[in-house]
Amino acid sequence: MKRILALLLALVMVVALCACGPKDPNVGPASNPGTETTPGTEPSENPGPTYTGIDWDALAGMDEDEASETVYDFVLGDYAAAYAAAKEEEGDMRMAMMALAEAKLLESGAFLPVQTRGGNYSMSRVVPRSNAATILWGLDNYRYHTLLVCNELIKAEDRTELLAMWEAAESADAYRQQATEFLTGKGYTMKDTYDVAFSETVNIWDVIATSYTSDSMFIAGTYDNLMEYDAKGVQQYGLAESYEVSDDGTVYTFHLRQGVKWVDHQGTEIGEVTADDWVASMAHVADNNDALGYLMTSTDGCGIKNYNEYIAGECSFDEVGVKAIDDYTLEYTLAAPFTPFPTMLGYGCFAPLNRAYYKSQGGTFSADGDQYTPGNYGKTPENIAYCGPYLITSFVEKNSVTYEPNPTYWNADAVLIKKINYKYNDGSDPTRAYNDAKAGITDGSGISNANLETARTDILEGDEKSVLDTYAYVSDGDGTTFCGWMNVNRGTWANYDDPSVGVSPKNEEEQQRTKDALVNQHFRLALLMGLDRGAYNGVIVGEELKYNRLRNSYVPGTFQFLASDVTVDINGTATEFKAGTSFGQIEQAQLDADGVAIKVWDTATAKGDGFDGWYNVDNAKAELEQAIAELAQIGVEVSADKPIYIDYPYETYEELAVNQANVLKQSIEASLGGAVIVNLIGMATTDDMQGATYRFSKGSEANFDLSTGSGWGPDYGDAQTYLDTIQAYGYMAKNIGLF
């Protein structure tokens, strides 16, 4: 499933990041620093190769896609070439070349990896890793039926023992049994409810038709997958009982569990789960191609046979590679072998869809020759069919969501949590999440900077030490990478859905100067290297943890490791990497060879997170000097007297967001000597903020110059799941103002 994620600052939730470490002081100076000038002075008479910038007049005569392609080639052409070459390879060579390609992506400065989730102090009643929390992709970590939850907050020392127990356990079931015995022996009592805060707005309840985690996380427990990851990170059978793969690696045949029931929101039986449910699902994916269809294509995803051709109108749906051989035999055919295919099966695009119920809600399929409409399907939790562990029994927008067990669920004995209560927190009170968790209203919370001093002094009844000393742990990380996006082809200076909101204070000349600056690679790198991400993050998690969740690359450095030795060409030099080498270490080799002062991998700690490998004032100034020289060649002066103005939207309704925005502004302006001024554009509501930075469908609707409002989480276990999103027409390319 396509996972674009809103960065919601107020709730520092219990999920999150590993990795810690100090700021690295050894990031060297940028190569090719350009002329010996300082920001605000005239460039030298020898600016280097001719710089032409973008011909905006020519661009104005193109259609939107052609214009986007032109800007994309200018900004990301080196990355596109390297990535295309990587996708031609297989196995370890593919992984290594994708790491080299991502180095080119980061060198472009089109965006800045900022942070992952977590790395903050947290407290929780949830037994760690009692569901699929360690899986970096998919929706299984939002499936809570196997959670173990205590009535009491779990002490940090006991959590440490539980994690060691998880490491040693032979299976997920064995771990849960051992954990329960350990905790009850320590005096904890177990409960069968899970109370969790949320701050997201759900727009649709159709998991196949949404590309937003802020929708699909709420739907994940309502249906079952063919396969599902367990608490030990092992993929187990779900609605499939077995499967086999053809010798050529292109045909996957799943044998389905018989007797599984579909029910409506009241638990009334409406049918049986059969192979046709996945055929109907694929037809629905195709009708909603902009949401999840990219995962079906040969260029961007697993390559379902003839999916591309069907979308292009070149064949009928009957020729697409999904077939119901009989009621309980499902067959997927790929256009070419794609080893990560089974890792994709937990996504919304592979969820089953009951054809009859969908049609009863007024839904139609273009595959049937009809004009497509979803009808009422997915409008509310009352308008979907269920075959998973839970029914949604109550939903009040921006208030609560309640889940109770599905009485017909095929694996009812595995449902340990008998009720899930989502409770809305809009983030306006930065102390609420902490206080609710402490009081047992919710089962966990991050301890943000706003509550850190309180947690140092709070002592709960029966305890000898403070909440921080007794219960706080540094939360685990995940695969999500939140980014600072650079809009290199801005098309609007107010919110597309409400032109009265988010209005830029810039005049037309200032708008054009910003566009000229943001298509310059050195200007972008100067801006991004000038942001003190530690200080920015410290607003949320506190000074002592401010580096913990910093991420330095789009693909996490530990996302993949070589299974065998590989030799690749780096700038004409044959370079060998041994089996076990991480993605991040290979990526770093390309950055070093190119002389670009970005650090994405720390050899000493074997981590790519937990230090700031971008922020360096000297490097930022050197990049700015080169940008000044190049922009001067196209008649654009950049100086403290003639600054570039950068619009940055932020949430005025969240105290922590306000503080972060001010840190960002002060950091960039100080680093670049006043040659860049950040305009803070206040957004009064969540809808306003998301309209500017998150819920827009094309690049021309992005209302910012710089935004930290969204990120990406992986869809499956291959680096392609990240890197595809920044190729031409890739899903996240809209965040840099393209396509």
Image (spheres, rainbow, N blue to C red):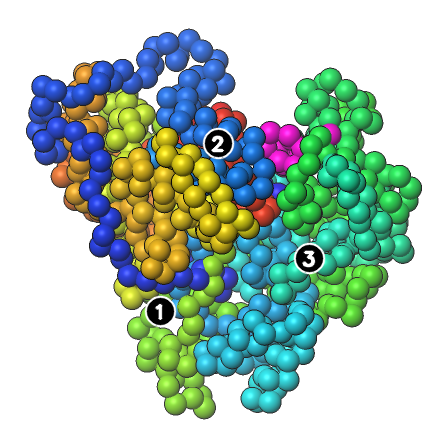
**What separation in Å lies between label 3 and label 1 (alpha carbons)?**
38 Å
In the displayed structure, does residue 652 sit left or right of residue 260? left
Residue at 57% across, 89% down: 187
Question: Could you tell me residue 582's position as x and y percent?
Answer: 46, 51
Tag 2: amino acid: Tyr
Residues in magenta? Answer: 291-305
Tag 3: amino acid: Gln
**What separation in Å lies between label 2 and label 1 (alpha carbons)?**
44 Å
Residue highlighted by disc 3: 235
Q: Quadrant of residue 203?
A: top right
Residue 532 visible in the snapshot: yes
Q: Secondary structure at mark 1?
A: helix
Residue at 62% across, 74% down: 169
In the displayed structure, does residue 569 sit left or right of residue 39? right
In the displayed structure, does residue 573 sit left or right of residue 329? left
Residue 13 visible in the snapshot: no
